[in-house]
Image (tube, rainbow, N blue to C red):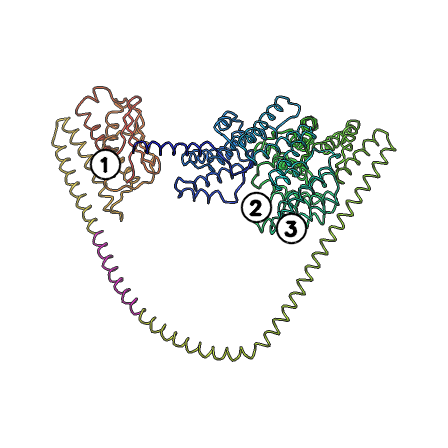
Amino acid sequence: MRLLCKIFCLLCLSITMTRVAYAQNTEGKLTIKTPNDEPADLKARMAVTKADTDKVRLLIKLASISWAKDPNSNPNELDSCIQFAYRAFTLSKRLNYNYGYTEAGLVLCRAYLERDDTKAATELLNQATGEQRARLLLVFGNHYSDRLNPADSNKVRLVKRYLTSALNVAQTARSERWISESLLALGRFEYVRGNVENGKKYFSGMIKYSAEKHNPAGEAAGWWEMAILPDERKYYLQGQEYYQHAIDIYLSLGDKAKAADVMSDMAFNAFWYKDLNIAETLFLKQISLIKAAGKNKFYIAYLQLADLYRLSGDLNKALSTTLMALKNIEKLNHKRYLENVYVSLGEIYQELDEVNESCRYYLLSLQQPKIRGYNDDYYKVLRFLAKGYIKLGKPKQALTFSLQYLKRNPPNRFNTKQIAADVLGLCYQALNKPKVAEQYFQQSIKFDDEFWANQSTMTSVVVNIAGPQAYADIAEFYASQRKFDRSKFYVTKGLSFNKLTPVLEMNLQHLNFRADSALGNYKAAIGSYARANHLRDSINRDKQLTHLNFLKVQFETAQKEKNIALLEKEAAVRKKQLQQSALVRIVTIAGLAALIVIVAILYRLNKFKTKKNNQLQQQQNVINTKNASLEQLITEKELLLKEVHHRVKNNLQTVTSLLANQLNATRNKQVVMALQESLHRVEAMAMIHQKLYSTSQYTMVTMTSYINELVAYLVDSYNPGPRIKIVRQLDEISLELALAVPIGLIINEALSNSLKYAFPNNKQGTITLRFENSDEQNILLNIADDGIGFCQTDTDDKTGNFGLRLIAGLAKEIRGQFCLNTNAGTCINIVFPQR
């Protein structure tokens, strides 16, 4: 019975675990939310967090931050995103943590697709079930839909299959959220394809479904998405009507923040179709709604308003609104949006023809951290900056910066490739390289044709040079080359567009005037000239008004500050007069009390100081006595060391005298040689003690003078005459006695051997002696001759081999590396460490 109960419990646990592992309900959305946390803070917290759900959430945040960074300028961030997300995914799976499993799976899937690792993304999709499977199917569909060329029928069918599968899975799972998301995705897809009516059916279906589920927020979302119609004038009013439906529903729900978001899109739609008065009204209403919602993030609305004012020619309002956006960003510390402000300021100063200021702000914007999804804007700014440098007479700087930037951020879409080609064309034109410039301008036009051919019918929110600006640049190039027929061709194409800023239209009309004049079309030339002058006067008038407004604002500000300062001064004087009598009494009493306290403190301090001085004097006397004792001990030690070296030197001299007497009394040649070698060895050691005794350095031997004396002694002993030349290369090195004695003996043995045996039969030759620093820690001793070298009998002979064994033993004693080479003469090489 107990066994059956245990089996039943395990079975229930298994069913529960299976349900948690495979139900895969989701809490998040399709987008990856970027947290405001600093990566360093998150990593520090993660280091001290155990492997639980908190660690999973930290890993997901780190993955989301890496995902948000632009992959072109931050190529390693995508790998970091995948690593963090994978760790969160596997840890969630181990913890059976559904939220972490699904959210990490979403980030992983999007990152794999971004890296074109379709196999890994598909494996994730195959593991998913229920809501998570519907969600990942939508990720696949949206990924390919965003990159869709409507003419590619295979990709169209692939996207449709993913989105339809997502809808079917969501319906099977009875997931209201993902049924709605699938219907919205299908509607957007049909809009991209240009099938507006089919798209509306899906959006209407989503609105109807939300109504049946009593979900008014879902209805509002449906109207909002349905309003984002393709970029055609005939859809403008329909879009505004749909936006208004969404706003009305959100306001009825009391969600003013959402209503403000929809109002932003509605205002931009009006701005896109040059309904500028309506757009301005809507942007201002959006700001009011944000304030009413209790929010304080206004800078996006301010920047959109600034663009509207700039393009309509009201540069004063454009500048003031941009500065309001800057203050709001600084207040909220949303630094990653500073680049948008810098771009806006650069464009405004460009319109004011203040090139240095515009270049400064464009450069600042390009130096900001890149955000995913804004690549096109960076290339547009690069073009403005390059044109600014060219206008300042710095075409080489423009070209160098552009090439470096394009190397770090290679363009990967038609419009960005077009901007890159246009920028290089402008640079080479300014550098007077017309052939190269023409190639790049023609590339720009080629990319322009491909851009429009592959552009979906959806409204593009990215302002780029596709169209009129590209034609204006190539037209100006051909005009500079006096190819006015080609210039006229591209000017006509540029003027055919209906979204022209006053400055751009003025430039095109001026180019049109030059081309028509050169081609003899004088009537058309006069019309173009009149239109260009009219636009120029209007722009100049706006600039003058802007500068006057700047001065007026500065004057009024200065006056206000001056008046405020005067009022503050009067108030301070009045307050001082009222408080003066009370202050006199308080100060008198406080002064007396302070005086008494100060006197008492000074007395105590003086007493304390006298006591401390006495203590310090006593301590100083003790220190002086100890110092005198130490100095006496040091002097005595030095005298003792000097006496020791003197006695050792005398003893060695005695040994030398005994050896010399024995040498004179002996006739056996072998004994004479042995006694002579011993005499030299003893003399080598005696010289060291002589140097220590005769100098103030009692522990260190100056090797340069010692080696020179030893060489002179050996030369004098063997008397080779001028036939043997001794070359010395000696660094200024001082060694301890324990090292100096072995080195002296080694030099004695090696040099004696060379003087005696290397040059028989009065043969001439050279002996080289090197004693120098081989590096910071080691010293090199090298003794080489170009004599006859060793033969086999020499090295095998016990008598001849004693010197070598002595050298090897001494080298080992000083921890040196001993090397003997007898190929061309004899070379003894010893490298030993300094102590």
Residues at discs 2 and 1 in contact (Cβ within 8 Å): no
Q: Which residue is denoted by mark 2 in the rendering?
A: 335
Pointer 2 local density, CA inside 10 Å: few below 14, some 14–19, many at least 20? few
Compare marks 2 and 3 and give the one earlier in the sequence.
3
Q: Which residue is denoted by mark 1 in the rendering?
A: 742
* 7 relative position to 106: left or right: left
Q: Is residue 352 visible?
A: no
Residues at discs 2 and 3 in contact (Cβ within 8 Å): no
Give the percent coordinates (x, y) of residue 463. Answer: 68, 36
Residue mark closest to the camera, 2 vs 1: 2
Q: Quadrant of the N terminus?
A: top left
Compare marks 1 and 3 and give the one earlier in the sequence.
3
Range drawn in magenta: 613-638
Pointer 1 local density, CA inside 10 Å: few below 14, some 14–19, many at least 20? many
Per the image, label 2 sits on a secondary structure element best described as: helix
46 and 458: which one is in front? 458
Residue at point 33%, 40% (across, down): 732
Give the percent coordinates (x, y) of residue 313. Answer: 75, 45
Q: Which residue is denoted by mark 3 in the rendering?
A: 324
Per the image, label 3 sits on a secondary structure element best described as: helix
As drawn, 289 above or below 51? below
215 and 613: which one is in front? 215
Pointer 3 local density, CA inside 10 Å: few below 14, some 14–19, many at least 20? some
Q: Quadrant of the C terminus?
A: top left
- Measure how far apart labels 1 and 3 are at the Cα level: 83 Å
Q: Main secondary structure of the magenta part?
A: helix
Compare marks 2 and 1 and give the one earlier in the sequence.
2
- Measure how far apart labels 2 and 3 are at the Cα level: 15 Å
Amino acid type, mark 2: Lys
